[in-house]
Amino acid sequence: MTPALSTMEGLAQGTLGGDDAEALLRQLLDGGAPIHAGVTGPGGAGKSTFLHELAVVLRREGLDVVRSLDEYARAEFGGERAVLLVDDAPHLSDDDVAALTSLMRGDGPHIIIAFRPWPRSQSVARLVDHFGRERPHLALQYLSAADIRRRAAEVLGEEFPEEQAQSVLDLTSGSPRFVDELLLAVRDDGWDLNPATPLPAAALERLRHPIDGLHRELLDFTVALAVGFSISGPALATSARFAGSDHRDLMAAARASGLVSPDGTLLPIVRITILQGTPAHELWPMRRELVDAIEAAGLPLGGTAVELALHGFRDPRVARALCTQADAALPTEPVDAWRLYAASIEAGADIASLGARRAQAAWAAGDIHAAERLVDGLLTGSEHPDLPRAMHIAAAIWARKGMLRRAADAYVGLADAEASAAPLAAVTLAVLGAREQARSALADAPVVEYSTSAHVAVSLTAEGILDAIEGSPDRALSALLQASSVMNESGEVVPLPEAPAVLAAHVALNAGELDIAAGVLHSAAEAVQGGPAFRNRLRLTQALVELRADRPARARRLLEAADSSQRPLGLRDEVLAHSVRIGLARRTDDLATLVRAWTAARQTVARMPMDLTALPALGEIAVAAARLDESHFIAQPLASAWALLDAAGMPASWSTNLHWAELQAAILRNDHAGLAAHSTALLDAAPVNRVASRLAEAGRVWASALAGDVDLPTVERAARDLATAGYQWDAVRLAGHAAGRAADHRDTIALLALARNLHPEAAASETRHEPRETAEDRRDDGSLSARELQVARLVLEGKTYAEIGAAIFISPRTAEHHIARIRRRLGVTTRSELIARLRLELDDGDGAH
């Protein structure tokens, strides 16, 4: 390849068919018959730049190059054929066109002419047609992202990130002129390529230049496209301003100017330039004409209304259109609804009339504080025309805060006027234990002729929770699972006092169906049942289920997800979160962590609201209180819980878990009377509840084991039944405690094996920490392993070898082995020295942690 052809490779960049450019240059250099060729492309495509670079290459090769007809007429040439380069053909006069046509007929110069696709006169049109269709030509195309990165490296002097190159491409469609302008704005003015960021003044002035040069009708056309007119819609056809215009002619001219994409839309950067660079008083009439034209065509404003409002255009028709769109989005897309309501207010809608709908959108989007502020404003002022909606939201907010009685009263008050309120009243009253009132509210509910999916789901929820209280747990679980599924599939987000999935999970939990409980909560979380407001409640309820199933790692992940969500918890969810923290600390026998969790929970526990869904959390808290000798602190919440259950008729499926928790607390307190009372209650419920019968037997066996009476087959059967009933961790504890008190060493080994089988994670831990020496065991650096630290904490608590073994599922002999190794590591011989050193070690460890 000759040097000239090598140079031409650069010229071919950005052209359609680099081979054509190379062939053209070869023909021009080889001489021969005159070459007539065209270079086409819209404004800003780089035609002038191409001709300039071509002239440089040809002159370097010794050819005479002239850039206009006047220059050609004055020039004197040698023997070589001259090259005439003509730019911007559409601006040629008729005389110029005639002169060029004459030169083409004879043995004249090579002629290369650049032109836009759309000429302005018939004579120019004929000339362009000759060059564009009858002669070879180069069609310049826009730049790709890779081309933009190369160009940016030249302009900026450094590598341009791919995402920024893509931003430039999105804004300019690759138009070389606008690409360069944006790169200059980045380099000289620090623009961030964000369409929402105003263009720098210097960049805006440069970008306006090709727009300001348009003739009046074409300028109006581009401004119309910028404010929302579309060439493919009927608005242009019904617009008075463009009634006498040839729309096809205007679009052809707009495309030729390089301001419009082939699909008829303005380049984004052109639209931004027009909207930012045109005074508002000049844009307002065009926007008004747009609304008039769309209205005249009988079409909805649609997305145009949003754009108009965002640019400050106030018009009642725009406001109404935005409200209509917001109302349609409210049930399933609350975030969009909130944005549309805000836009409608900007367009002139009455802010007061939208208060309740905005509150519903805020609630559904998870912004509970905003919803509460709006509702409070509505309830404290004069009567609002949308008061029932406001009361629905207020009731949901009160329920979230634990004020269920107030929420129930609100729903009952609404039930006479609104059929949708009756099942919500029934659900709220039922979880408060007021089953007769709940059944009455449901029976008296007005008939709904055409129910929405959400209403069907709430009605099923009400029936299900009442069945669960009235002694039909299997039927209740079926109804509640169906309610949760319907709510998930509907996609609707309506204000609720409780998510159907949460109630379904509690009924499943009471029945020992832990996998069903976890599954319904997982599906609800995936579907965002109840909206973001219920996301953490679903997580925390699932965490309680995972604790019961002895899957603490999963429970911890769910708790951490709720803690990191930065979404405020209502009081009921705060109780849940504290109960999970306490439960996790209990399951790791970490006394220091348990004390911290209890201390953090005390204030919330003191004011915890009571309803049926709070009972599992209360059970966790009650056992922890007994462990810490703080049972007096929760005497009132427990009294409230038993009063609630008594009002509900003491349903066995709901009271069983609390009886079991009280039994566990009595064991920890060495409270024989309490142990006997709750064991008797479980025995009384056994004939009608399969879970209660298993718990009653487990409680009897546990009490016997603690008294030193360990019968291996009986303990094994009770532990397995306990696990089957959904109390996996308690089953492991029963086996461990019995192992620590078994008289026969073989029974101890068998019960520890049972504990390991019931708790696979503990089995793996036991295998890792049997007395067999490891490299870690043999080290003599004075530091304690993780397992030894665990044993050391139990030693400080005053536990015996047997109790240590029961706590962490190892044999007493293994516990003794660990303590001996700890003494050796720390270099102590007496128990008092050991205790003193351990306090020092654990204080240092906690501080480091």
Image (spheres, rainbow, N blue to C red):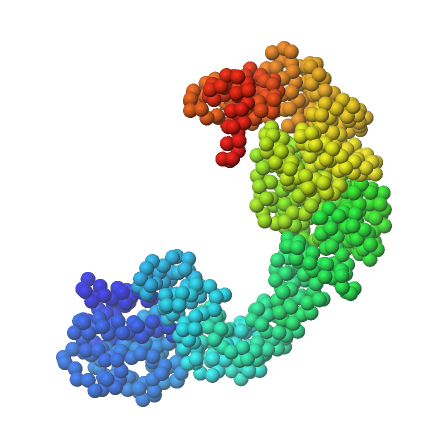
Q: Is residue 589 left or right of residue 52?
A: right
Query: Given the current orientation, which residue lies at the most extreme left position?
Result: 79
Query: Camera-side residue: 466 or 680?
Result: 680
Q: Is residue 61 left or right of residue 675?
A: left
**Residue 815: image location, x then y, percent:** 55, 18
Query: Camera-side residue: 22 or 674?
Result: 674
Q: Is residue 253 left or right of residue 379?
A: left
**Residue 429: image location, x then y, percent:** 80, 45
Q: In the rendered view, tell whether residue 651 sits above or below residue 733.
A: below
Q: In the rendered view, tell whether residue 555 sits above or below residue 268.
A: above
**Residue 78: image location, x then y, percent:** 14, 80
Identity of the residue drawn at 59% across and 67% down? 306
Please indicate, yes or no, whether residue 512 appears anywhere in the rendered image: no
Query: Camera-side residue: 136 or 633?
Result: 633
Q: In the rendered view, tell whether residue 483 sits above or below residue 69.
A: above
**Residue 304: image location, x then y, percent:** 58, 69
Residue 466: quarter of image: top right
Query: Given the current orientation, which residue lies at the most extreme bottom position?
Result: 95
Identity of the residue drawn at 17% across and 71% down? 61
Identity of the residue drawn at 74% across and 33% down? 632
Q: In the rendered view, tell whether residue 428 sits above or below residue 765.
A: below
